[in-house]
Each structure stands twice: as structure tokens, then as C-alpha cells.
Image (cartoon, helix red, strand yellow):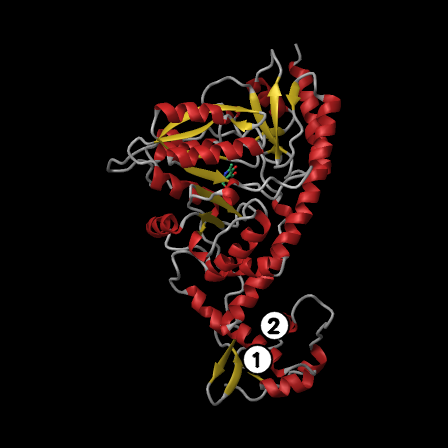
Amino acid sequence: MSSPVIFPFKSNINLDRKSNRHLYLQLCDQMIGFIKSGKLAPSTKLPGSRKLSDDLAIHRKTVVSAYDELISQGWIESIPAKGTFVSQDLPIIKPKKLQDSSILLEAKDTAGFTFKKRRHLIRKGIETIQATLKVDDGVPDHRLAPIDDIAKIYRNITKKAHHKKLLIYGDIYGNIELRKALVTYLNQTRGLKINIDNVLITRGSQMGIYLASQLLLNNKKIIITGNTNYMTADNTFIEADGIIKRVAVDKQGLDTNEIEKVCKKNQISAVYVTSHHHHPTTVTLSAERRMHLLDLAQQYNFAIIEDDYDYDFHYNNAPILPLACNDSQGNVIYIGGFTKIIAPALRVGYFIAPKEVVDEAARLRRILDRQGDTLLEQTLARMIQNGDVQRHSNKVRRIYKTRRDLFCQLLMEKLTDFFEFEIPKGGMAFWVKLKKPYHWDLVMVASQKQNLTFINDWRRYDNDNSGHNGFRMGFAALNEEEIEEVVEKLVRAMNSIKT
Ligand SMILES: Cc1ncc(COP(=O)(O)O)c(C=O)c1O
């Protein structure tokens, strides 16, 4: 190794104390710059942390953190009893480009063995033109996700030595801190009466629906859903070998009188309900029907799978509390998560149920996915404790309300010759019905010609072939400019097929 460095750190390193970037990272960035540019050559001895901290007038811990970071990235190395040196083998600055083998001719398409194929899970893909404007069926705007805050908290957690234990095979019920935080959060904000034994952390609501179906529906057991219903949930029930019986959905949500009639004739295992905003029609299950449904569940001993996927988005008044908060006999499995409040890729959700159901679901989950992203779960626990989640949800609620109002106003001004819709009280989508004699297939084709793509097929909302002619149009993920553009393109598309 070479002799002590003569590189003048003091005059070359500039640290900005007002910057959002932590001082130790600024130090790392600048040292990496010197190494990359050759100003600090391989094997150069670096000053000790005490000397460098004196020179730069910063805390010694800041230098130690910077050195730790540079060591972990491979830029420098520490040699016991000798000191710290620029690495002899520097990390490869430009990684060798991997050869693109995505169209290898020998790659296999067909298997040399038989396996179960699930036709009901095949989705008709919509061909999209690149750079086209897209309308989804009600997802959050991922551009608003507080990703910097999440990254900062995640990083802070990883820096604490005692948090390294989060990297091991952990609790199959999910991160304990998040479960505790959820108990307080859900009891306070949604009137639930739960303790930690009632909480299982999942990878989003979908995993909760899957687990509930697997527990409830084997061997052709009956589940009641709405006509029409969230298609992925229906698929999950079929996959679990359940039989779906459908009841009407009107302006008050699922028709509970029809549910009662089904219960009188059949032994049913569960009712699936998106109580806050029915998927796809967006209506809220009325208070009266909620009480009726709970009474029926107690009388006929069935489970209510309450999928409260968009509880946070209500624009006109305070949300009606979930069915789960009046569940005195343990009939409700309450499902929700962070994918809608923050972003779909943040796969963290919760499954709330009586302890014995949670225990069984946790054991089942274990064989599918040993555990979730424990560090991310810890991060979300912090964000609930700090009030960050609540602040973010208030912020996006305001933004989505403005978007809903604008989309609504433009649809009313320009498209009522073709569409009928009600203003949704909450959620992230409109339920739009196409007037006669138009057909959604033609609307889709005409929109594509305007470079406007609806990313879901309308048949997705007609899973019982009832011909209701409705379609979900998401507004939350489009900013105001995009909403105006969508409506303009839609006007042009509709005029082109006008009869
Ligand atoms: C009604 C409903 N339930 C559940 C889900 C699944 O949510 P997650 O992404 O949390 O799994 C969705 C997703 O769009 C949904 O619309």
C-alpha cells in the first residue's frame, strides 16, 4: 500500500449543510468523484476519520458513516492495523453490457410435461400503441407516491444495527411494528375493535382475498357476490373451487333481500362485498343494508369478506364505517392495504379477522410466500406512527376530488349524448354507461385512432354477460391537463362513430 495521501481534502471537499442530502452521502459522492476521475488513485491511503473530521469540521461519525458506505460499495477498503485505502480493484464503473437474448431461438415455449391450465385466469390483452394516452379503471396516481420519504425511512432503518434482524426469516404474521401500528390506526380511524392477534400482514388486498377464499370455499361451497362484481375476486373464488351466486346491485349496493332469499334455499359460506364503493359500479352499501347483512351473517353463519380497498377516498362526506366495526360475532374478514393510498407496487396489505382465522391464514400464507418485505413493513409502521400515511392520504384525497370534479364537469358538458353516469361519492373511477345504439368495441377502436387507450376490456365488467353496458373509467391517475386531453380525444372518437 502507498504512503499517506497528499490529496488536499480540506480544499476540495465542499459540504452543503443546507442540502437535503445527508452530509455523509455528500462526502461519499465527492470521494467517488475523485476516485473515478483518478485524482485518488487505487491503493492511496486515506486520512483517518479523526483527521478528516477535523479538516472538514464535521462530526467524526459522519466520516465513519461515509467510509462504511464507500467500503460497502467497494470503492475503498480497510486494512486492520494499517488504515483505509482506495481499493486496488475498483468497482466496475461501466458494467459490461449483457447480451440481449430475449429472442433466443432455442428458448422453449412448450413444456415436456402436463400441468393444470386455468382458462378462467386468461385475460384478453388490449393492444396499446406506445406513447398513447391511457385510461385505467381506477388506480392511484403513482407519480404522487411519497417515494423519497419512504426511501429515507427505509434507509434509516437499514442503518440501525439492531434492525439487521429484520433481514432474517421473520414472523409469519408480518412485521410486529406494523401490526401494532395497524391496531391503533384501524381502531381509531375505522372504529374496529381488534388487537394484534387479529392482524395478518399480506402482500396487498389480493392476497387477503385469496387466503379468505382458500379458507372458505373448497369443495363447491357457495359465495355470494354482486352482479356485476370485481372480476379478479370472482376468478379467485372460482380458483378456490367455490360456486358464485350473484345478487343484484342497485343504488344502495348489494341487494341484501336477495341474499336472504339465497340463504333460505342454500347453505352459503361467504358474501364478498366492496362496501365502501362497490366494484365496479362505485355505489356505497347503505347503512340499513350493512346492518341487514351482518344480521344475516349471524343468523346463517357465513363469513363476510369485506374488501375495503378504497376506504380513504371519499369526497362528499365522512365515510361510513366498515361493517367490520359492528361485527359483534366474528363474521367479518376485513381486507385492505396501502396499494391504493400509496402505489400499487407497494405490496403491503392486511387481513383482519378473528384470531383462529388469522392463525389459519398465516399458516396458509407461509407456504405461498414465506413473509413479506419486512423492511418495507417496518417503514410503513413508522409512517403510520409519524402521521405520514394519514397526511399523504389527505393530500391525495384533495387532488383526486379536484380531478373527479373536472372529469365530471367535462363529461357533462361534452359527452352526455353518448354516456350516462352518476357522480361517484368517492373512489377513483366513474361507472359510465354507453347509450344506445353505441357499442364499447367501436368506442375502443375509435379511441385508439385518437391515440387514446382504455387499458381494460369492457367485458371485464360484464362477467355475468348481463349486458349492462357499463364501463369503469379511472380519473385519479390523470392530472388535469391529461383529463382535458382524454375528454377531447373521446369527443373526437365519439363524433367519428356518431350515427
Ligand atoms: C376491488 C379491489 N379489490 C382488491 C384489489 C387488489 O388490490 P391490491 O393491489 O392491494 O392487491 C383491487 C385492485 O385494483 C380492487 O380493485
Q: Of residues 233 and 454, which is closer to you in this image?
A: 233
Task: Determine if residue 443 is in view.
Answer: yes
Give the left or right position of residue 250, taking residue 369 as reference.
right
The kind of residue tagged 1 is: Val
The earlier-in-sequence mark between 1 and 2 is: 2
139 in relation to 100, above or below? above
The percent position of residue 270, horizontal first and vertical second, equals 40, 34
User: Disc 1 on helix, strand or loop?
Assistant: helix
Instruction: List the residue tagged with mark 2.
Output: 28
Quarter of the rendering occupied by the C terminus: top right
Give the left or right position of residue 465, taking residue 33 as reference.
left
| Residue furthest top in the image | 499
Q: Residue 329: which quarter of the image?
A: top left
User: Disc 2 on helix, strand or loop?
Assistant: helix
75 in relation to 447, above or below? below
The kind of residue tagged 2 is: Cys
Instruction: List the residue tagged with mark 1.
Output: 64
Q: Of residues 81 and 455, which is closer to you in this image?
A: 455
The 10 Å Cα crowd at callout 2, few under 14, some 14 to 19, many 20 or more, is: some
The percent position of residue 424, horizontal first and vertical second, equals 64, 31
137 in relation to 449, above or below? below
Please give the name of the residue rendered at 35% of the width and 38% of the height, measured from the top-left corner.
216
Please give the name of the residue rendered at 54% of the width and 51% of the height, measured from the top-left corner.
186
